[in-house]
Image: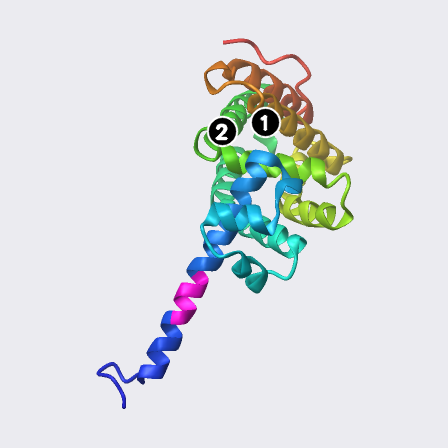
Amino acid sequence: MNSLDGKSVGQRRRAGTRRRGERTRSAILKATLEVIAEGGVRAVTHRAVATRADVNLSLTTYYFSDIFDLVSSAFRDFVELDKPRVEQAWEEVFECVYQYSAAERRRKDVRQSIRRRLTTIGTDYILHKLEQRRAGLAVEHHFYFEALHDERLRDLYDSSRAPVLEQMSQFAALFNRQSPELDAELLTATILKIEHNALIEAPDEIDRVRMEQMLGRVIGWIMGLNEPLREK
């Protein structure tokens, strides 16, 4: 017998089962990220995740074949959730740069103005991650260090960073066409260092001025401005 919406009782039951399954899977992935944030990738076990997600232990093995499947799926979900904020930040970066013509960008005063704005955008983005997604930022760093020991995780981490490095290279190429990829690597390393310092500090001890100095210095290097960023 069909219901009023044209679906059979069996179809409605199957749809309800799928929705419950999706909620359970999402809860397991969220719990996995929480376990990683607190104890690192090696702290992930089916039992630890099931306990955190408050689900039956058998469900973690039902939805995920092994620990790597569980960890990698959680990290991919994390990257997808973070993508809109990352894209927004890069839109701001290129909007700031492209408001000036190529000829204008060769002027020192214009490059200095761009650097100040980009330093603010970058610092705001890092602080947003620290304030709103501190656990997520910790997950990123756990993956970064664990990738040193596990080739599969290294490939996963590298693939997640590739779009960011591409954007950084595109930005660097506007000011240095000879080695933009190298500049992108240096900028990435600086941001990782800033984030690492902030993660090991208490939230009320985070030094925004120091962040701006570090980030502004490397951005200035990329843009051909070798003098230090002035303190405010």
Kindly identify the residue that appears in the image at 65 percent across and 25 percent down. Answer: 193
Report crowding for label 2: few under 14, some 14 to 19, many 20 or more residues within 10 A (C-alpha): some
Q: Is residue 208 above or below residue 11?
A: above
Q: Nearer the viewer, residue 116 or 43?
A: 43
Circle 2 SS class: helix
Report crowding for label 1: few under 14, some 14 to 19, many 20 or more residues within 10 A (C-alpha): many
Q: Are marks 2 and 1 in contact (CB under 8 Å)?
A: yes
Q: Which of pointers 2 and 1 lies earlier in the amino acid sequence?
A: 2
How far across and how far down the image is residue 220, in percent? 64, 22
230 vs 1, left or right, is right
**Residue 100 seen in this snapshot:** no
- In the rendered image, the residue lying farthest to the left is 4
**Viewport quadrant of the N terminus:** bottom left
Rendered image quadrant of residue 139: top right
Q: Amino acid at mark 1?
A: Glu
Kindly identify the residue that appears in the image at 74 percent across and 51 percent down. Answer: 152
Magenta segment range?
17-22
Q: Magenta region's main secondary structure? A: helix
Q: Nearer the viewer, residue 16 or 190?
A: 16
- In the rendered image, the residue lying farthest to the top is 231
Q: Nearer the viewer, residue 218 or 84?
A: 84
Circle 1 SS class: helix
Q: Which mark is residue 195?
A: 1
Question: Between marks 2 and 1, how big is the CA–CA gap?
Answer: 8 Å
**Residue 227 seen in this snapshot:** yes
Question: Which residue is under mark 2?
Answer: 130
Magenta stretch contains residue 217 = no
